[in-house]
């Protein structure tokens, strides 16, 4: 078994390419999800397969909008890997910088760092490597500051997103530079299920700028209480949910690239990856989706 060694701040991590690694002498392994589907889930799965087939046969460009440097891979890496060789696929990460103005010594220490700029420099490099492993060549880091360093409290959401409208507009302007909205495309966003993190909620809210083309991924979490649709998605939205069932070995291998985050992300001796789950409006599966773009371009 091939083993490579990464010497990071304060510790050495041995990376096993079979989706296992050693951290401080403790072996951690990533396992693919256990896949069992009942009749109802099979019907939902057919819809998911229809969505992916539509994307790949019509070569619809896909844009995965990630809050942080690892979120898209952790939550949607398997589907990203499948789409990467079949259509133009881009991963755009929004909050990719720290700041010296608001120190976060506890998180830096947890990651084995003392300097935020070094941490985020390494994280950007790791993200590029992880996404390259998944077949993504177009990786965009927008350079906005992480909420923990921006506000001093990553959970500082407040009662309304209205106080963050200026930031949302700035991010949307940046996104628009990379997304051609004149022809069919799909944007993938986190649904922020069970998440209080400000940046995840803001990223989810950005889907309002792309109402005709948004698909949502259920977010990766080690917590068992993070299931279910968010309040923003009601049954009246005609949303379909489905799972993606392939490419998990490739996803596990890509996660290994996040060397600065492994100890902080995975405190368990064994991690079984959850099945990726997606929500999307029914109209994306019919011709109305394509017709909307053709009408707009006339």
Image (cartoon, grey):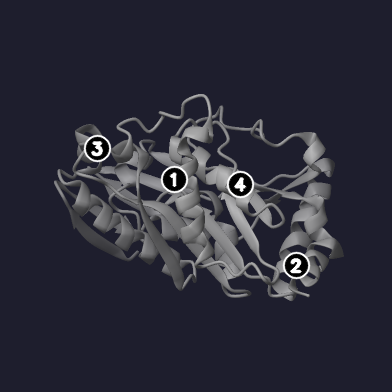
Q: CA distance from mark 3 to mark 4?
A: 27 Å
Q: Which mark is residue 110?
A: 3
Q: CA distance from mark 2 to mark 3?
A: 42 Å
Tell me which numbered mark, 1 or 4, is placed earlier along the sequence: 1
How many marks on residues? Answer: 4
Label 2 crowd (10 A; few <14 / some 14-19 / many >=20): few
Of the two numbered discs 3 and 4 in the rendering, the one whose residue sits closer to the viewer: 3
Of the two numbered discs 3 and 1 in the rendering, the one whose residue sits closer to the viewer: 1
Tell me which numbered mark, 2 or 4, is placed earlier along the sequence: 2
Q: CA distance from mark 2 to mark 4?
A: 19 Å
Tell me which numbered mark, 1 or 2, is placed earlier along the sequence: 2
Q: CA distance from mark 1 to mark 4?
A: 32 Å
Secondary structure of the residue carrying numbered label 2: helix
Q: Residue under label 4, please give it.
A: 275
Label 1 crowd (10 A; few <14 / some 14-19 / many >=20): few
Q: Kindly check if marks 1 and 2 are in contact, taking CB atoms under 8 A apart as contact.
A: no
Q: Residue under label 2, please give it.
A: 53
Label 4 crowd (10 A; few <14 / some 14-19 / many >=20): many
Secondary structure of the residue carrying numbered label 3: helix
Secondary structure of the residue carrying numbered label 1: helix
Q: Which residue is pictured at 78% across the width and 75% down the height?
A: 298
- Pick whichever, 3 or 181, lies toward us: 181
Q: Which mark is residue 288?
A: none
């Amino acid at each position: 078994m091939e083993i490579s060694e990464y010497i990071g701040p304060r510790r050495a991590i041995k990376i096993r390419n079979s989706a296992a690694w050693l951290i401080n002498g403790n072996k951690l392994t990533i396992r693919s999800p256990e896949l069992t589907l009942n009749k109802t889930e099979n019907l939902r799965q057919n819809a998911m397969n229809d969505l992916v087939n539509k994307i790949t046969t019509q070569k619809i460009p896909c844009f995965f909008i990630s809050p942080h440097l690892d979120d898209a891979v952790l939550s949607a890496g398997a589907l990203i890997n499948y789409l990467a060789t079949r259509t133009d696929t881009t991963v755009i990460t929004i909050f990719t910088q720290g700041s010296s103005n608001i120190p976060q010594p506890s998180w830096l220490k947890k990651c084995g760092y003392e300097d935020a700029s070094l941490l985020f420099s390494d994280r950007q490099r790791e993200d590029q490597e992880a996404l390259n492993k998944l077949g993504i060549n177009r990786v965009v880091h927008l350079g906005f500051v992480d909420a923990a360093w921006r506000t001093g409290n990553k959970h500082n959401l407040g009662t309304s997103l209205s106080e963050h409208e200026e930031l949302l507009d700035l991010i949307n302007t940046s996104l628009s530079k990379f997304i051609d909205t004149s022809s069919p495309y799909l944007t993938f966003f986190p649904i922020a299920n069970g998440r209080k993190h400000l940046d995840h909620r803001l990223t989810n809210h950005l889907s309002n700028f792309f109402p005709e083309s948004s698909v949502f991924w259920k977010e990766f979490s080690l917590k068992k209480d993070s299931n279910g649709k968010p309040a923003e998605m009601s049954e009246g939205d005609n949303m379909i949910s489905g799972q993606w069932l392939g490419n998990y070995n490739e996803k596990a291998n890509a996660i290994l690239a996040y060397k600065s985050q492994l100890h902080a992300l995975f405190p368990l001796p064994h991690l079984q990856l959850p099945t990726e789950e997606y929500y999307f409006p029914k109209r994306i599966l019919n011709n109305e989706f394509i017709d909307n773009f053709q009408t707009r371009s006339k």
